[in-house]
Amino acid sequence: MIDKIQIQDKRFDLATGAGSDAIHKDPQYSYAVTQLTENGKTGTGLAFTLGAGNDLVCNAAKFYADTLKGIEVEELMGNFGQTFKKLSNEQQFRWLGPHKGVVHLGLASVTNACFDLWAKKRGVPLWKLLIDLSPEEIVNTLDLSYLEDVLTREEAIEMLQSQVASKKSRTGILEKGYSGYDTSVGWFNYDDEKVRENCKKAIDNGFTAMKLKVGSTDPKRDIRRANIVREVAGETSKVMLDANQQWTLPQAISICKELKQMNPYWVEEPTHPDDVLAHQSLAKAITPVKLALGEHVPNRIIFKNYLQTGCTSFAQVDAVRVGGVSEFMTISLMCKKFGVPVVPHVGDMGQLHQHLVLFNHIAMGHEALFLEHIPHLKQHFVNPIKIENGVYITPQETGSSCDLK
Amino acid sequence: MIDKIQIQDKRFDLATGAGSDAIHKDPQYSYAVTQLTENGKTGTGLAFTLGAGNDLVCNAAKFYADTLKGIEVEELMGNFGQTFKKLSNEQQFRWLGPHKGVVHLGLASVTNACFDLWAKKRGVPLWKLLIDLSPEEIVNTLDLSYLEDVLTREEAIEMLQSQVASKKSRTGILEKGYSGYDTSVGWFNYDDEKVRENCKKAIDNGFTAMKLKVGSTDPKRDIRRANIVREVAGETSKVMLDANQQWTLPQAISICKELKQMNPYWVEEPTHPDDVLAHQSLAKAITPVKLALGEHVPNRIIFKNYLQTGCTSFAQVDAVRVGGVSEFMTISLMCKKFGVPVVPHVGDMGQLHQHLVLFNHIAMGHEALFLEHIPHLKQHFVNPIKIENGVYITPQETGSSCDLK
């Protein structure tokens, strides 16, 4: 049974300019870390923040984690959906969300520690644990409440069941590796020359997809830099643009029409993440430019609204932003139903998500598109992700690769 | 200039059953209190929680309040909209929301302290300060960003300007008092007999509107109790039903159709507060039953979406949930534009909101409908609200009536 609980506030400084975007000028990448120990085995879970307030998330994680003391992890995970529902609706704490912000980030950290511990107890990598679960076992780890109008428990099980026979045909990805895309070519504060150099390096390193931060006060800067990336990357590479919520709706409409010329693969987070209807209007106004949304969407319910309006062509759910692995899988199932590919934002630097995208592809039948790659905290992990020739090498260590040194 | 900052974590136990609803079975009414002192005058601001985690909100309030040290309050409030925008977008802290949950509650507490201090410095009640401001001065205290598609600065000023000539004709409310409605007749855990008794008392005390908590596991309990309230209240009184997010969309549709028979004035918070589209579907499905929404809506952007879908017939914005008085006024302006009355949820027990509804009516031309009345913390305030014959007596003390003993 879980007999030891530790919460740690870990903050890491970045090199100048790294991690910067139109809104977040000077982030300090930080984790609220939950560790749950059962019979000497320790599960590690992360939530991600940009520095200030990481302590608040740690406090919220402690509140939830303390309730798990004395429980056997196998018993816990057999119906984790019930636990998730209970914790996320704790009747006083719920007022602070519900299901969003600091408290939900705290829950993510705890949930992720539970899944990590579960995989370690079974002696397998998380992706292996998840793809070997039966459809019922997977759905037992999910809380589908408030999704009744689009995804019932029965339907979720059926969706997974319908993929079981073809699962084996999709395991080739384990050998081949999951493609990555490079976000670090074009952080906001990098000058044009550095962007150009980084793009060349990315191509040399085998990447065929990369992302530029936009949302400058002067739209001409965005357009100039987008053209630089396109020029170096060539016509066959995918180039994504990320505004990090900087634009108003009228601005976004106007700028996206100009950016259309360099053929972006997607435009990401154009405006405020709570504004579902603005994204719906924008998506219509700038067709065929596609939107990628979800980095700041805190839960399955808002993702449901995003999917219902049809505004998002790529769902960027992040398992260290929503309530952890459990809610990530719930949202992935909804995305599958709505025919929207899942391309996670990697607050975890890709450590956890490399497992989850393999599961999404193999067990859920999601397209194996690509996974964001941000290397800045690599040296701090016990088992850092390995990327070769632009491709994630499938992790073989037990658990979810989230242990920090 | 502001030279002293104090944050206090205040929690108050309630009598058995008081404050209970379908989701929150055993709340402990609590305030994260910000106090800002300038030349010996102290402004008090509140955010409201249900107990656990109130300390997190206090920590967030401290983070924001510390940035105000050394600033003159008159200077601060002359363009408070800029300060609100800056604080709510602090580049690291913003990640924890943005504009929702613990950090936004913390901001509410600080914002409310600023407005309280401003009114005290001018030696007037908050309602008087606000109704005497010019349209430009009011709009200078607001952050309208991300609302560009529905409400520009120019339009906001024009809307207020168009009400200036008729302001005087609406000041009669100051003498007459603002009507209250009684929420404490039917807390969830009260038995049928207590509900019946409380309704009788409410009628005896002059109330002509009252609210019952619904969302029981057995819908028959809801229907039976709703009929009790209607029976005691009579046909001419208004009876509101509040499900506190308990229902799924399919449940809400089915139950609201049954509750229609007792002619509820509104049904409140039927399902999850993030689910804008579910409320849109529900509103259509149960016409002519009306929805009252917003108690858990954290910011102006989500309120915008609610208004755009036309699902809410009453906006229950709460100035101790959204980012304080400033964002409350922003949302009230949007509601005016969309023709939706503002009927605040009173996490503050009505202390602050009694000022704000007077402002909404007199300066903005909102209908003076009624204001929720919940008396449970009355004895803890220096100047508790006064209600006589079901009507709020206009407060005359300086500030926003939020000082706690």
Image (cartoon, coloured by chain):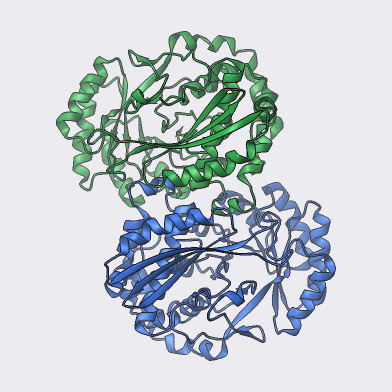
Chain colours: A blue, B green
Q: Toward which corner of the image does residue A269 lie, by quadrant? A: bottom right
| Quarter of the figure that contains the C terminus of chain B | top left
In the image: residue B257, left or right of residue B197: right
Q: Where is residue A152 in the image (x, y as percent from the top left)?
A: 34, 63
Of residues A251 and A399, the one drawn nearer to the viewer in this rendering: A399
Q: What residue sits 59% from the left and 51% below the top?
A: B93
* Residue B331 visible from this viewpoint: no
User: Number of marks in the image?
Assistant: 0
Q: Where is residue A62 in the image (x, y as percent from the top left)?
A: 40, 58
Q: What residue sits 37% from the left and 46% below the top?
A: B52
Q: Position of residue A8 (x, y in %)?
A: 48, 64
Above-or-below relation of A59 to B55: below
The single residue placed furthest to the left in the displayed view is B193
In the image: residue B360, left or right of residue B314: right
* Residue A214 visible from this viewpoint: yes
Of residues B215 and A202, the one drawn nearer to the viewer in this rendering: A202
Q: Position of residue A310 (x, y in %)?
A: 55, 59
| Quarter of the figure that contains the N terminus of chain B | top right
In the image: residue B24, left or right of residue A292: left
Above-or-below relation of B103 to A166: above
Of residues A193 and B370, the one drawn nearer to the viewer in this rendering: A193
In the image: residue A76, left or right of residue B398: left
Q: What residue sits 54% from the left and 12% below the top?
A: B170
Of residues B72 and A238, the one drawn nearer to the viewer in this rendering: B72
